[in-house]
Amino acid sequence: MKTQVGIIGAGPAGLLVARILQLNGIDSVILERRTRAYVLERVRAGVLESGTVDTLRTYGMGERLNREGIPMRSMQLCWDRQKADISLDDGTGRHLTTYGQQKIVEDLILQREADGLPIVFEADVSRLDGIEDAPRIHYRHNGEDKVLECQFIAGCDGYHGVSRRHIPGSDEHVFLTEYPFAWLGILAEAAPLAARRGFAHSTRGLAVASARSASVGRLYLQVEPDADPNAMSDQQIWDELDIRMDDGTAAQLNRGPIIERSVARLRGYVCEKMRHGRLAIAGDAAHIVPPSGGKGLNLAVGDARIMAEAIRRLLTTNDTTLLDSYSEMCLRRIWPTVHWACSMCEALHIFPGQTSFQTRMQYQTLNHWGNTEIGQQRLRKAQLGLPYEI
Ligand code: APR
């Protein structure tokens, strides 16, 4: 099989690169290891920066988002039995939007299918070659070994994908921190309450309450790194969430059936070498942020915009200038965002062996973000996200 751009991975990064290329008249084939049903059902992030919303609208993916996205104009931090409700209004009209990544992925897949464009599910990519001049993607599909020949490879295959290791010397450009805890994430059929939302620091560990829709809540508890997602009963989870989210009032979370549970390790990871020859990587293939801050999806969208434009210039006018500065341009958004997500992570979790002095230091950080003008500005700026250069 032949195409102009071979895209590995049908996550938000790969699907968005494909969509932008399509609207610029460039053909692509997406190869995705998982089944269609798995990709459509996978529950992930759900907080969109306004830049992400604008990007999706620009590329014709705003219809359901405009209808179902829930504006989020403030953010709550809770610690030491107190709460701060920080306005995200920076005078520009920007705000965050609650809209599950799952829906973005579904919108993009359904649109691509309606346009009659190829996504090959259950296509497991094993290796790449010719990335200097004539790229080839080797994959297995329906029990057969196949090859996709293309002019450029977009490696959008997530943290465990194969693309990154085909960038020569990429290991030497990797920066990693692993946190000694994980998040137990639940989806619950329980209408989220505006008064019981946000991030909570508790001496028992972090808790987070957020909305996925008007009737479905997405909530998290800090747990041990290797915790069993089924170790706690529904009632134990709700009790623990209420204890950790205590803000000094008697308010409690709305409870309801838990319909999904998963445990995810927290890490910060950046591969600074994001391109070699006719291969570039985007999204989780290049970086992972701890979920505190809700930045992973937004970073993937930022990379996808630059990658698609760099590929367009290469394939239409043979101009490699943007491609040559792809890593640097992406990293100007990635590092400050990773820094913010890690700062949130370090202020909100209880670390093994943490002293009460260290807990008091965390309270000071939270008080700074929650109750001082300069701290609120910092939080607002970081949460709303950095501007795009492209
Ligand atoms: N062959 C084909 N497909 C692969 C391979 C492979 N060898 N390896 C991985 N994939 C696929 C995965 O199955 C997955 O569907 O690549 C896709 C990568 O998608 P995501 O993990 O969603 O990554 P990305 O598109 O970068 O989106 C980043 O995902 O993890 C969240 O919070 C993160 O919201 C952020 C977003």
Image (cartoon, grey):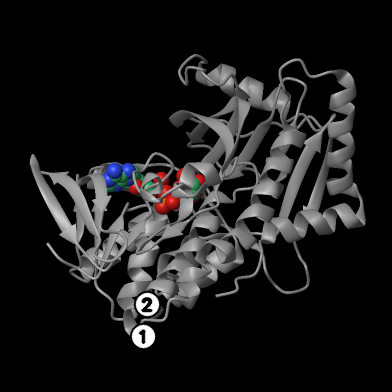
Q: Is residue 44 above or below residue 1?
A: above
Q: Are marks 2 and 1 in contact (CB under 8 Å)?
A: yes
Q: Residue furthest bottom?
A: 317
Going by the numbered disc 1, the residue's amino acid type is Thr
Image quadrant where residue 239 sits: top right
Please state, as top left, top right, bottom left or bottom right, where the N terminus lies in the image.
bottom left
Give the residue number, with chain letter if any, for mark 2.
Answer: 314
What's the CA distance linking mark 2 and mark 1?
Answer: 6 Å
Observer able to see residue 212 = no
| Residue toward you, 364 or 170 | 170
Observer able to see residue 185 = yes
| Residue toward you, 57 or 213 | 57
Q: Is residue 37 left or right of residue 313?
A: left
> Residue at image x 87%, y 19%?
356
Q: Position of residue 260 (x, y in %)?
A: 43, 32
Give the residue number, with chain letter if any, for mark 1.
Answer: 317
Q: Position of residue 188 (x, y in %)?
A: 49, 35
> Residue at image x 85%, y 25%?
358
Going by the numbered disc 2, the residue's amino acid type is Leu
